[in-house]
Amino acid sequence: MSSRAGTQVKPRCSTPDAIPLLALVPPGVVMRGAMTPIAFAMLFLQGCSKEVDSKSTAITVPSVATKADLEPQIRRFCGDCHAFPPPESFPRNNWAEEVNKGFSFFYDSSRPDKDVPPLQATIDYFQARAPKKLPLPVIANLAPPSNGPEFERLDLSSLTAHGAPAVAHLALVKAGVAKQPGLIVSDMRSGEVRLWETGGPTTASMALANLSHPAHVATTDLDADGINELVVADLGSFLPDDHRLGKVWWLRPQAAGVPWQAVEFATGLSRVCDVEPTDIDGDGDVDLVVAEFGWRKSGRILLLRNQGMKDSVPIMEVEVLDPRHGTIHVPVADLNGDGRPDFVALISQEHEVIEAFLNCGNGEWERQPIYAALDPSFGSSGIELVDLDADGDLDVLYTNGDSFDSALIKPYHGVRWLENKGTFPFTVHHITAFPGAHRALAADLDGDGDLDVVAVSLLPGPLADLKQPDSIPGVIWLEQVSKDATSGEIQFLLHRIEGATCNHAACALIDWNGDGAIDIIAGNYDWNSKEQPAITVYLNRLQQRPASQ
C-alpha cells in the first residue's frame, strides 16, 4: 500500500460552484423547484442505442469571413458548447455530413451567435486537416496463453421471447429471500428481466418481469420490509428519441415461482439509463439517483427523494441535479469520507466528461471534474468505481468505444484507469486501445491477490464485416503483472478471451459455478432476428490446472 493510502478527495461545499437544485416534474411525482432550459447539442451526439443520422441537409449561412480570421471564428463557433472537435477525429469524407449536422443543431438551439462562419468554409477547414481514413488501432501486449486461467465457453439462452438478444446490463444481486446471489439479465429489446441461479452446477433461471426496455437493475429495499427488491431503469424505447416514455420500475418478489410484481413509480421521464439507490439525506429511507440519458433535447440527472409510502407505493420528490443530456452511469460512493453518499456521473453526448457530485448536505452539491475528453465524439460508454491500485481510495475504470454515432472504428477507443490521488481531476492512465470498448470491470481472475480487468466490445452491425477477428477481440482479460512503486503506474498484459465477435454491451465477473474462481459472463447484443444465446459464460478453469503450471 502506498504512502497515500486512504487519501480522500476533500469537498469545499461552501464555494460558489455548489450546484443549485433545479426541478422538472414528470406525471405522478411531487413538484419541487423550477425548470431550467436544457442546452441543445451542437455536434457529434452519442450514447446508448444511437443511430447514424443520414438525413443531414446543407444549410446556407449568411456570413462572410476573411481568410485571416476564419480559423479563430470556426474555433469560437464550434468550441462554444463543448471541446473543439479535432479534425483528425473523422475521415475527410465524413466532415461534410458532420458539419452540416452541427449547423442544424446550432439553428435548433436558438443560440444568439452573430459571428457564424460560412458553412462551406467550415467544411473545407476540417477536410483540409483530416486524414483520408482513420488508422486502425494498435492493440499492444496481446499475449499468448499464460500460466493463469483458461476459460471454457458456455452459451445460455435466457429469453422467453425467442429472437436476437440485446442484453444491456448484468448484475449480481441478492434478490427476494434467496440465500445465494443471482445474476440479473436485462434485455432491452425483449423487455425481459431474468434471474439466473449461480454458485452451483445448475443453470436454472426465471423471468421476473417483462417491461418496456430495461437498461439497468439494482437491488434495494424501498419499503423497508427486510426483503430485497429491484429498481429498474427503463429507456422507454429501443431506438433513441426525445420522448417521455422512460420510467423507473420497482420489482417486488411474490410467491416462489411466480413473476414479481412490477410497479411504475416514476414515469414521464426521458430515456432512463441508470438508477442507483442510496440514502442521500441520511433520514433512514432509500432515495434514488437517476440518469436520464435522453437524446438530443432531453436528458438530466435526477434525485428521487423518498417521501414515504402511499398505498404501498413510494412517493418520490424529484430534484434535477444537472440539466445536461447524455448521462450513462451514476454509481454512488462516499468519495471524501465524510459519511454522506456522493456519486460519479459519466456524461456523454458532446460533453464527454466524468464528474464527481459531492454531497454537502442540506440539499447542496459540489461538482468536481474527474476527467474531460478533448473530443466531443470520444465515445464514452461506461465507468466503474474500484480501488484498482489497492491504495485505499476509489478510482474510476473508464471505457470509450461507442461507435453508433458514426459507424467508425476509432484508434483512440479503449480502456483507461483514472487514478484517485486525492485531488481533482484524477490522473489518467491509458491501459489499452480497444475498438468498441463498452464495459470494463475489475476482479482477481488469476488468484495472485491483485485486480485484473475484463473488458468487452460492442461494434454496430455495419462494422461487423469491416473488423478483422485477429486484430479486434470481443472479450479481453487485462492481467495486472506489475506496479511501479514510485509512479504508481500499473502494467497490464492483454489476453484474448474471444476474437470472433464484438457484440457485448454488458459483462459481469462472478463465481458462476461455485468453484472459487471468478468467471466471466458476457451479455450478447445481436443485430439480426435469429435466435441467439443471451449470455455467454466463460468458466475460469484456474482451479483445475495442475500445480506445476
Image (tube, helix red, strand yellow):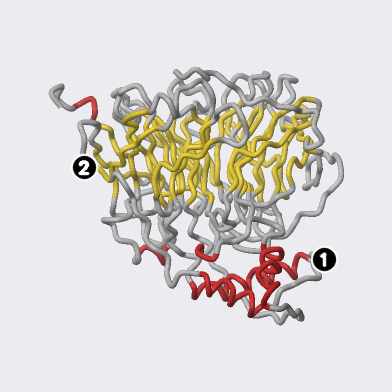
- Residue at 61 percent across and 55 percent down: it is 349
State the quadrant of the N terminus.
top left
- Gap in angstroms between the C-alphas marked 2 and 1: 57 Å
Res 217 → quadrant = top right
Q: What secondary structure is marked by label 2?
A: loop
Q: Residue 93 location, x and y as percent?
A: 49, 75
Quarter residue 506 falls in:
top left
Secondary element at image label 1: loop
Q: Nearer the viewer, residue 369 or 220?
A: 369
Q: Is residue 461 above or below residue 95?
A: above
Left or right: residue 36 compared with residue 440:
right
Q: Which residue is mark 1?
A: 112
Give the mark, 2 or 1, whose residue is nearer the N terminus.
1
The circle on residue 194 is: none
Position of 517 with respect to 110 (left or right) is left
Q: How many marks?
A: 2
Say which residue appears at 44% left-offset and 28% top-offset.
Answer: 488
Asked if the residue under mark 1 is in contact with the one under mark 2, i.e. CB atoms within 8 Å, the reply is: no
Kind of residue sitting beneath label 1: Pro
Instruction: Tell me the residue that label 2 is attached to.
Output: 144
The x and y percentages for residue 114 are 81, 70
How far across and down, in percent of the image, does residue 259 sit?
A: 52, 37
Closest to the observer: 304 or 455? 455
Q: Is residue 93 visible?
A: yes
Q: Residue at x 65, y 35 (%)?
A: 356
**54 up-or-down from 139: above or below:** below
As drawn, 486 above or below 247: above
Report the front residue among 479 and 32: 479
Q: Report crowding for label 2: few under 14, some 14 to 19, many 20 or more residues within 10 A (C-alpha).
A: few
Rendering coords of residue 382 (x, y %) = 52, 44
- Toward the front, the furthest residue is 68
